[in-house]
Image (spheres, rainbow, N blue to C red):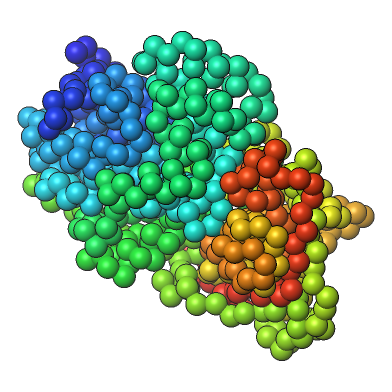
Amino acid sequence: MPTLTPPGYDVHVGVPMRCRDGVQLLADVYLPRGRARSPALLQRTPYSRDRSIVVDGAIALRAAVEAGFAVVVQDVRGRGGSDGRFEPLVHEADDGFDAVQWVAAQDWCDGQVEMYGRSYAGLAQWLTAAACPPALRAIAPMMAGSDAGRNWFGVGRAFEQGFVTAWVLTSLAAGDLRRSGDEEALDRLSTLTADPDGWRRPLSAADRELLGRTLGYVGDWLGGPEPLERWLSDERLHVDLASVEVPVMMTGGWYDFGIGGVLSTYVELRSVAAHPPTLVVGPWSHGSFTGSYAEHDFGPGAGVDGVGHSARQLRWLASHLRPVPGDAATPPDRGRIDLFDTGARSWAEIEPHSLSATADLVLHGAATSDRLGPDADATTESAAPLILVADVSDPAPTVGGPVYLPGRLERSGPRDQRALLGRPDVVELPCVGVPRGTQLAGAVVVRLAVSAPHTGTRFVAKLCVRHEGTAGKGSTMLLREAAVTVEVAGDSEVEIAMGYVLHRLGDDERLVLLLSNTSAPRYGPSPVEGHSTTEQDGPIRCAVRHVTLGLVTQAADVGPTEV
């Protein structure tokens, strides 16, 4: 167990811990100098404890140590240097409980442990907190709601085919196959990942079988709705938010595919928690935290560094520790909601009730008086159904949005959607009842009355802001994208929960809604969920008879605030 001595702190590499079943996990421990005992920050990761993107990804290591924290970064079971078999999320409640209590018992720890980290490390925090280890004082999950199904797999919406396939192929499979010694599967994985389009296509049945003989999660996640449902039904994956007794600071990103899970967790937690949760949502994606994208820059105050988010998390975590004699008390930061307004390009403090109730606006199918301002245009009269013609050989592509995909075109963020306009599988509806200057501030819901030929037919909605511009330099920038599948063929009514938005419309901006059956590769190429490209014969036609958009709006700004 080597010890390194960089300036200001000591590093103990590969510190072993025994779980309750005897499996050994390894951690790196960073200890501040000059303190006999310190409170500890614990992060548990499947992505290798020594990677800088892990060590400094959510909270800057040096800042944490200088603030007086010991920092522990541990490889989860079966990953990195830890023993055992990796079964995603299955062991994180028990192993997390054991890790918290083990850290608290070390002679360099004062008995207080808090957890931090983003993505998988965030989900691991929720599972640990629900297990109630006595030494745990607070958690700060970033880019992670408490429900894996809603957060990552699209349960209740549409399956996140692109993300799950890319996650398996590019982040998980190689390490697990090398551990197993399955050379045949490893060779096939190398072939798949060498193809830049390999992750864009659903895995073939043969590839699922080959990889799945070693990687159980391949069959669980990519084998269709029934295996995924069985995997998600495992009680070890469930988080009862009423059991989370410690304070929580949640961080999300408007362009993270899991933002719906983050905010739905927040709303539920607020209703049951003893401590009001704190929430921060910036113009960030799952892998980018600068607030700057290829087609849009939200300004220097939008990034996590510009807003000082690492320091804020440390202040919040410190506020939930027992005071150390001689240390200055840290004022609490509890129950606050700070969201970035993507239109005004500024931060705003929001009241909790703003995240729920909506007012409806009919966009197609009947005349309406539900206009949201005196200068709103008249809506359309009752009209013939909108027709979508979707072809699996030429699916409507994913262009940016709340995604985590490795492709250049699909890269997350507020991308221009004009390339989709005019396709037979995309219809555009102007939201003529929303006047300029309106601030959208809360939940967005799209309700459709549809006719679909197959059970599992998917409907995708994209809420966009059209910049009128001059000299042909306008754009149709994506705010939110979400999807849902119909439960029955024929006529039905469906609701697409678009998530939440905070965006003040500028004088040259209007809202538009795009509807389609596909967004590939995010939801896969087929307009029918669970169908392969060989199971569908020719284009399918769907009719949309009625479209209602539910919005929370305010006539003026929610006031800007310092974060």
Q: Nearer the viewer, residue 453 or 89?
A: 453
Q: Nearer the viewer, residue 500 or 77?
A: 77
57 relative position to 76: left or right: right
Quadrant location, the N terminus: top left
Would you identify the image quadrant in which residue 537 lies? top right
61 relative position to 14: left or right: right
Q: Is residue 315 above or below residue 548?
A: above
Whether residue 29 is visible: yes
Residue drawn where x is 67% and y is 28% of the image: 197
Q: Is residue 456 above or below residue 142?
A: below
Quadrant location, the C terminus: bottom left
Total labels drawn: 0
Q: Is residue 108 above or below residue 384?
A: above
Residue drawn where x is 12% and y is 32% of the image: 20
Coordinates of residue 380 in the picture (x, y in percent): 81, 80
Q: Nearer the viewer, residue 494 or 335?
A: 494
Coordinates of residue 542 in the picture (x, y in percent): 75, 62
Residue drawn where x is 43% and y is 72% of the image: 351
Q: Nearer the viewer, residue 227 or 303?
A: 227
Residue drawn where x is 55% and y is 25% of the image: 207
295 relative position to 523: left or right: right
Coordinates of residue 432 in the picture (x, y in percent): 76, 75
85 relative position to 544: left or right: left
Coordinates of residue 163 in the picture (x, y in percent): 55, 39
Whether residue 403 is visible: no
Would you identify the image quadrant in which residue 119 lies? top left
Question: What is the residue that sits farthest to the right in this orientation?
Answer: 471
